[in-house]
Image (tube, grey):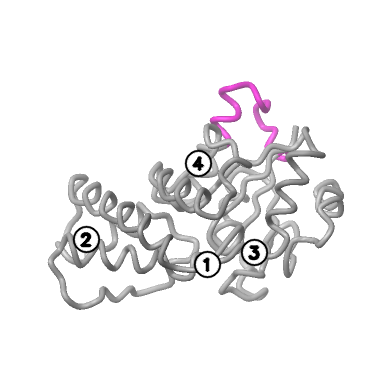
């Protein structure tokens, strides 16, 4: 069995800033701010828990679990509304690839390895009609750990604990993402990584420190070719 661990934002879909706007609303609501919060770096490749911790620490001077949890809940609440208000889109060939895998490739499982929280991931995928393609139970989400590499280890452990892979069998996991963080988290468990640039804000040279197994401009037009590439 081969397991594909998909990133969401920039890889499967783009929400047209629904998440960013939801986060700004949550910050303004929770901290009674009138001005937008200014982030010091790109949020691409970051986990929601690390983003929330950084915001709370910046505003309050330190971060407690209660403050982080409360801000996260507000963020998830505003996310639902913003997903409806923003008109995002799926990345090229995503839906037909997932459909092909479900119908024609029973020996390939689709998981999620994402910085989104479980609730945020589910809301996004349900909004864009993709949730039914994924095994959420063996996936890893951004509310489980701050570091993306730790999420990869959680996903691997979940598969291992349920006897779906053997110890050390990380070559049966393929991480698909769009950021250097995706390549690094795959490397952390010895998994292969495919970077798809169609929705990425990064360029090829940004992956020099941790080169992925393969790098594509977009998913292949023919899903059968996609499956073939997984074994080459």
- Of badges 2 and 3, nearer the viewer stands 3
- Tag 1 residue: 88
Mark 1 closeness class: few <14, some 14–19, many ≥20 residues within 10 Å: some
Q: How many marks?
A: 4
Q: Secondary structure at mark 1?
A: loop
Dividing the image into 4 quarters, which one contains the N terminus?
A: top right
Picture disc at residue 91: 3
- Tag 4 residue: 140
Measure the alpha-carbon separation of dots 3 and 1.
10 Å
Residue 207: give x, y in percent of width and height.
Answer: 63, 68
Measure the alpha-carbon separation of dots 3 and 4.
21 Å
Residue 21: give x, y in percent of width and height.
Answer: 35, 68
Q: Mark 3 and mark 2 in contact (Cβ < 8 Å)?
A: no
- Of badges 3 and 1, nearer the viewer stands 1
Mark 4 closeness class: few <14, some 14–19, many ≥20 residues within 10 Å: many
- Tag 2 residue: 57
Q: Mark 4 and mark 2 in contact (Cβ < 8 Å)?
A: no
Q: Which residue is pictured at 33% across the width and 63% down the height?
A: 22
Compared with 98, 204 (above or below) is: below
| Magenta-colored span | 156-172
- Of badges 4 and 1, nearer the viewer stands 1
If you read the primary sequence from the N terminus, does the residue marked by circle 2 or circle 1 appear first? 2
Residue 219: give x, y in percent of width and height.
Answer: 74, 61
Q: Is residue 161 magenta?
A: yes
Residue 45: give x, y in percent of width and height.
Answer: 49, 61
Mark 3 closeness class: few <14, some 14–19, many ≥20 residues within 10 Å: many
Q: Secondary structure at mark 4?
A: loop
Q: Which residue is pictured at 56% across the width and 44% down the height?
A: 131
């Amino acid at each position: 069995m081969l397991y594909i661990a998909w990133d969401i934002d920039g890889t499967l879909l783009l929400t047209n800033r629904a998440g960013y706007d939801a986060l700004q609303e949550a910050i303004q609501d929770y901290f009674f701010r009138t001005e937008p919060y200014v982030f010091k770096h790109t949020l691409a490749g970051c986990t929601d828990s690390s983003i929330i911790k950084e915001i709370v620490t910046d505003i309050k001077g330190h971060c407690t679990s209660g403050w982080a949890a409360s801000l996260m809940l507000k963020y998830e609440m505003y996310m639902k509304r913003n997903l409806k208000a923003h008109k995002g889109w799926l990345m090229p060939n995503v839906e037909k690839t997932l459909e092909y895998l479900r119908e024609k490739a029973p020996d390939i499982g689709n998981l999620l390895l994402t910085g989104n929280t479980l609730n945020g991931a589910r809301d996004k995928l349900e909004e864009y009609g993709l949730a039914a393609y994924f095994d959420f139970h063996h996936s890893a989400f951004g509310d489980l750990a701050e570091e993306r590499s730790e999420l990869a280890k959680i996903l691997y452990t979940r598969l291992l604990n349920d006897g779906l892979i053997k110890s050390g069998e990380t070559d049966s996991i393929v991480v698909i993402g769009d950021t250097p963080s995706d390549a690094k988290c795959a490397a952390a468990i010895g998994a292969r990584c495919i970077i798809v640039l169609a929705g990425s804000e990064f360029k090829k040279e940004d992956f020099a420190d941790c080169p992925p197994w393969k790098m594509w401009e977009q998913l292949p037009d023919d899903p059968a070719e996609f499956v073939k590439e997984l074994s080459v």
